[in-house]
Every structure is written in structure tokens, then in C-alpha cells.
Image (cartoon, grey):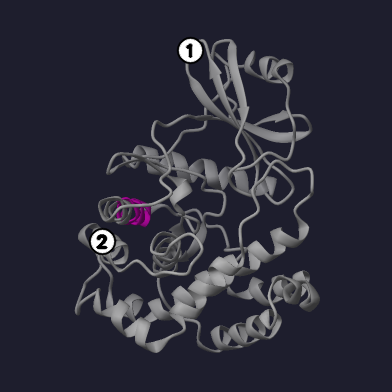
Amino acid sequence: MAVYTQLGPEQVSTFLAQYDAGELIALKGIAEGVENSNYFVETTKSRFILTLYESRVDLADLPFFYALLKHLHVAGCKVPRFIPDRNGEWLQNLAGRPACLIEFLQGVSVTQPTPAQAKATGVALGQMHSALADFDQKRPNSLGLLSWRPLAEQCTARGLEDINEGLAKRVEAECDFLEERWPKNLPQRAIHADLFPDNVLMLGDRVTGLIDFYFACTDALGYDLAVTHSAWCFTNDGTRFQTDLSANLLRGYDSVHGIDAPTRDALPLFFRGACLRFLLTRCYDWINTPANALVTRKDPLAFLRRLDFYSDDANISELMGQLGNGIEAG
């Protein structure tokens, strides 16, 4: 979440008049995230999230996100709903941008997760994967394997070197490594693809919401697990792997969904791919984020350090030992 498009209370009040949502009491921009413009909206009736979709979100993808969240909500997963206006329309236009009013879920995003919170997140991820077994809509992963080398080229070798000496060659070598070995025959279904701690709402040790599905796509479940693992199981700067968080997140996921043998075997590659994906998108944002945007740029090197960890055979051997043997998918 972020703010690129500035809104005033008069604009939002006019927007809310299309809904049975009450009158505006408070409006506040949300700085976290990098993709869309988001505002916290409080009215005389309830609280909402107002999202304006910026240029990096394809308008044609919005029906997929809408259908995905509706499917998960019906299945009992804790996800926010799109709020329809009085005419039943969920997609509007505001300040020249596609816009939606979205249900506000109680809870906070943790910055220093506990083992219990990591386990609860693994459970929620597993429940989401199980619920999506019969979701038949598809969206290609626009930030998957085939995008990483072109994304590095957009950053330019000079741009990568400005971030960290030797980074351009390291990225090129990692692209070569993953392109040669990437698993190609694993079952795929809709995944979140961005389940960082700031996209999980919690009250104590209980997950109250999974949010921000705008990277959701069709890909391997193991890749989604790897993204979540890389996001949750390190200190924010990537300097320290937290074994207890890892064991609990994997245990929680396995308890409700399981990990089949082919997925287990592919995880070391998925871990590295997840790190390269976020390293590159953070590099791109670091280089290209407008100076006047109300958005927090995120350190690319935090994912280079994670990539270093997952590239070490000794670390991977110890990590895979947490999974045990013969775990079957549910």
C-alpha cells in the first residue's frame, strides 16, 4: 500500500455519496507498500480502505482479483471484500484512476513476528491454498521467472552497481542458474505471491486478515510458500535467519495442507527465485520511485542477503531438515 495520487476530503466525500457507507469522518493516506494509492477512510457507519489503482496495475486484471477474493471469502478465509455501491458496482473512477472501496479488517501487521504468529500465518496460507483448489480463473505471474532478466535490464547494470558493487554480475549469474533449473511440471493454482508480514493482519497470535492480493497470480504453491518463508523468517534487513520462525511457519502450513515430495524437492530453487524477484523489484523501485511519492522505499540488499543464505548448501540442508520426510499434500 502507498500514496501516489493525492486526495482531499471533498473528493472522497463525493465518492462516498455513491455508497450506503455514511459520511466521511477521517481520511488518512497509508504509506506502506509500493503498488497502489491507499487511504484509510472512517465514516459515520464504518471503516474502509479506499484504493486507487496506479499505472503498474492492469485494469484488465481487476476482475480476477475481485473473483479471487469473493471465492476466498465464501470459502471462509479471512480476506477483505470489495464493497458495491448502491447500483451494485464495485469498480469506480476517482481522480482519473480506477478505484474501489474495500472492507476494513480489524488487526495489525506485526514487525517482529513471534513463532506463534509465524505458525498462524503458515496455517492461514495453507487454508488459502486448499480453498483455491477449485478456483478456475487464471492470471499469469507477470513477475515470474521470465520477467527477472528483463527487469534487471530495466534497472541497468549501472543502476544495480550504484546500489551495490558487483550486484549486476550477481543478478546475471542467478538468472542463468534459475533459468536452467526452474521446476516446470508442478501443479499450479492461484497464489498470493506477496504474503509479507505487512499483508497479514493479526490480533495477538490470531490471523484476522490476509490483504493486498494485487500480485496474486497462477503459479506453483511451493513458490508461494517460499515467498512467505523469505518474508517472515529473517530479520527485516536480512542479516539473520530466524530458525524458530521458519520451523513454526512450515509446521503450520504442513498441518493444514501438506507438502508433497516434488514441491519439497523444488523448494531450494523457489527460495532463491523468491529472493531474486524481490531483490529486482526493490532495485527497480529504488531507482524509479518519484521523489514526491508518499511511499517508503524498501532496501533491496535485504533480499540479496536472503539470497546469500538460500544459496548456501549447508543452510539449505539444515532448513530442509525442518520439513522431515514423506510429507504428503492435502
Q: Residues within 10 Å of mark 2 (few under 14, many from 20)?
A: many
- From this viewpoint, is residue 8 visible? yes
Residue depicted at 58% across the width and 10% down the height: 23
Q: Quadrant of the C terminus?
A: bottom left
Q: Residues within 10 Å of mark 1 (few under 14, many from 20)?
A: few
Apparent side of residue 206 relative to residue 224 in the rendered image (left or right):
left
Q: Quadrant of the N terminus?
A: top right
Query: Where does residue 5 sit, x and y in percent of width and height?
Result: 74, 36
Above or below — where is 310 with respect to 70?
Answer: below
Above or below — where is 289 with respect to 279?
Answer: above
**Nearest the camera: 23 or 244?**
244
Query: Where does residue 128 sit, x and y in percent of width and height?
Result: 35, 51
Of mark 2 and mark 1, the one earlier in the sequence is 1
Residue type at the position of mark 2: Asn
Magenta highlight: main SS: helix
Which segment is the magenta one? Answer: 124-133
Above or below — where is 279 with respect to 10?
Answer: below
Quick one: SS at disc 1? Answer: loop
- From this viewpoint, is residue 144 visible? no
Above or below — where is 162 with respect to 253?
Answer: below
Residue type at the position of mark 1: Lys
Q: Residue 45 bears which disc, if any?
A: 1
- Magenta-span inclusion, residue 226: no
Quick one: SS at disc 2? Answer: helix
Residue depicted at 41% across the width and 52% down the height: 135
Apparent side of residue 279 relative to residue 132 in the rendered image (left or right):
right
Q: Which residue is mark 2?
A: 248
Apparent side of residue 252 relative to residue 104 in the rendered image (left or right):
left
Query: Where does residue 199 sit, x and y in percent of width and height?
Result: 47, 47
Give me the C-alpha separation between circle 2 and circle 1: 39 Å
